[in-house]
Amino acid sequence: MLKDRTAIVGIGETDFAKRLHDTEWGLACAAIKAALDDAGIAPSMVDAMGCFTQETTPEFEIARSLGFGDVHFFSQTAHGGGAACGVVGQVALAVASGVANVGVVWRSRKRGDPGKRQWAGVQERVTDHWKWSRCQGLLRPVDEIAITARRYMHDFQVTREQLAEVALTQRAYAANNPKAIMRDKPMALDDYMTARMISDPLCLFDNCLESDGAIAMVIVRAEDVNTATQQPVYIHAFSQGLSPQHQLMTDYHGDDPLRSSSYTTAANLWRQSDIQAQDIDVAQFYDAFSPMVLYCLEAYGFCGRGEAASFIANGGMSVTGELPVNTSGGSLSEVYLHGMNLLSEAVRQLRGSADNQVAGARSALVTTCDSTPNGALVLRGA
Amino acid sequence: MIENIPLPATDDPVDATFWAGTRCGELRIQTCQQCDQMRFPPRPMCPSCQSQESYWQPVSGRGRVWSFAVPSSPLLPAFEKLTPYVVALVELEESPTLRLIGPVLHSVGGEVSGVEAKDVRIGAEVTVDFKRYSDDVAMPCWVLGK
Ligand SMILES: [Zn+2]
C-alpha cells in the first residue's frame, strides 16, 4: 500500500491574479523552484515529474529550464479539474516503489483572459462526445453542471439561499487570505441572490474565477524526509475514480446521473485509509462550480444523500463548523488553478500555517472534479 | 470564436445512422444485435455482452424532462442571439437510462429562441421534433406535450 510511504515536503506558488505578465512556462519554473527551495532540495536531484495533460509546456522544457539531471519517471493526468490528485498520486506511487526518488508536480495556467475560455474555441464541427451536448446548446461547463444542479435542487428541495452558503463561506475565507484574488470583495446573501444568472439555476458567484498562476509541490519517500529542515505532510491514501457509464462533464448516462465518479473514488479511498470521513479535520473539495461542494460532502460520506445543504447551513463549512471546507477561499474566491490551490492549502493546514488555520488539524481530504474522471487524497500531518 | 452554432460531425461510422435517421424524421437508438439492449450515445461495443454487432431501433420520440439549463451570457454569438432558450436532458419512454440532450422548441416546427425557465419543468412530457441546422444535420429537439 501507498499508505504514509511518501510525503509532500515542499510547496511553491506564484502570485495569483486576473492577469500575470509571465508566460505559463515561466510561471511553472517559478513555482517549481519555490517548492524545491521550500523543501531544501536542489533541482538536480529531481527525477520524477507529474503534470496535467492540459499543461502547455512539455516536461523536457521544464526539466532543462530548471536544470534537472537524469529524470526517471514522468506522467500526465487527464481531465483538467479531475486531475490534480492523480498527478500527485501517480508520482507518489513511482517514488514509493523506488522507480524514482524526488518528484515534482505542478500546474501552471493563464486563464484570466476571457479569450482563453475553452468553450470559446469550439470548432465548426464537433467530432467527439461533445457532439451530443455542445451543438444542442450546453456549450460551457457551467451549462453542463446546471443540468445536475437543477435536478439535485429539485430532488432534495435545496434553495438558492442554501446553495449560497458555499460561495459566501468561501468569500469570507478569502478575506483573511492575502493571496486571494477576491480578498477585498466581501459578499452578502443579497449580492448572491441578485447576481446575474450564467446558466439558470447557477449565478455568477457559483462559478470559479478566471485567473493566472502556478503551483508546484515536491514529493519524497517518508524515509528520506529530513525532519530537521522539512515539514512533511504524508500521503496517507489515494485513489482515482471513473464510474460505470461515466461520460466527461455531461455525466448523464449512468443509472443515476447524480451518482458521480466521486462515489467510486471515495469507496476505494476509504478502503485504504486508517483515517475515515468522521476523522477528517479539514476538507478541500474541488469547486469549479459551487454545487460540486455539496456533491462531494455526500459522495465522501460526511452526510447522507440530499443532506449537504443542511450540513453546511449556519456556518457548517466555516473554520469553526462541523467540517471546515475550502479554507483558502478555493476556486470560487482564491484562484482557479484546476484545484492545485486546494492541495497547497491542505498542506498548509497540516503544517499549521494556513491563514484560516483549523485548530489542531491533523488530517485533510482533497478531492478533484465531481463531474469528470477524478481522484482524491487523504493527507496526514506529521 | 465561430459565428454559427457548432454542428455534430455526421459522417462517423459509429453514429452516421443516427443522423441519417434524424434527417428523415426518425429517432433511432443503437441496439445490440445479440442481447437487444439499447445504448446511447452510440459506441462500437455493447457494455452488457461485448457484442460489436448492432442495429438501429426507431423509438417513439416521447420522454420526460430529467432536468434543464437556461444558458445566458457570455456565449457564442449564435447562442447569444437565441437567448432566452432552454436545453433539456430528456429520458426516453423506452428506458429511463436513455437520455438525450436537445433544445426545447416553442411548438412543433417552432423556434428555439424565446423559451424560458418558467415554461419547462422537471418531469414534463415532451416529444421529439427535428430542426434543420444544415444539409446534413437535423437536430433532435423537444416540444412540450405528448
Ligand atoms: Zn449486448
Image: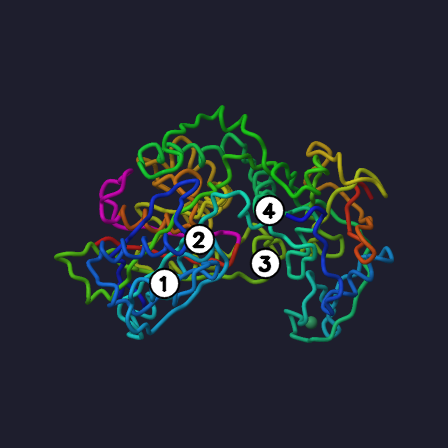
Q: Nearer the viewer, mark 3 or mark 4?
A: 4
Q: Number of callouts in the render?
A: 4
Say whether disc 3 or disc 4 marks the residue closer to the N-terminus.
4
The image shows residue A86 at horizontal and vertical percentages of 41, 61
Say whether disc 3 or disc 1 marks the residue closer to the N-terminus.
1
* In the image, residue A185 lies in the stretch drawn in magenta: no
Residue type highlighted by circle 2: Thr
Magenta-colored span = A350-371
Is B23 above or below relative to A44?
A: above
Report the chain holding disc 3. A
Residue that numbered label 3 is attached to: A247
Q: Along the horizontal axis of the image, is B5 left or right of B111?
A: left
Report the chain holding disc 2. A
* Mark 3 neighbour class, 10 Å CA radius: few under 14, some 14 to 19, many 20 or more: many
Residue that numbered label 1 is attached to: A62
Task: Give the SS element for disc 1.
Answer: helix
Residue A379 visible here: yes
Query: Is residue A243 or residue A113 the one in the foreground?
Result: A113
Q: Nearer the viewer, mark 3 or mark 1?
A: 1
* In the image, residue A358 lies in the stretch drawn in magenta: yes
Residue type highlighted by circle 4: Arg
* Mark 2 neighbour class, 10 Å CA radius: few under 14, some 14 to 19, many 20 or more: many
Separation of disc 3 and disc 2 at Cα? 16 Å
- Residue at x-position 63% and y-position 69%: B47
Is A253 above or below relative to A185?
A: below
Residue A279 visible here: no
The image shows residue A146 at horizontal and vertical percentages of 59, 42
Dots 3 and 1: beta carbons under 8 Å? Answer: no
Task: Give the SS element for disc 2.
Answer: loop
Separation of disc 1 and disc 4 at Cα? 31 Å
Mark number for residue A140?
4
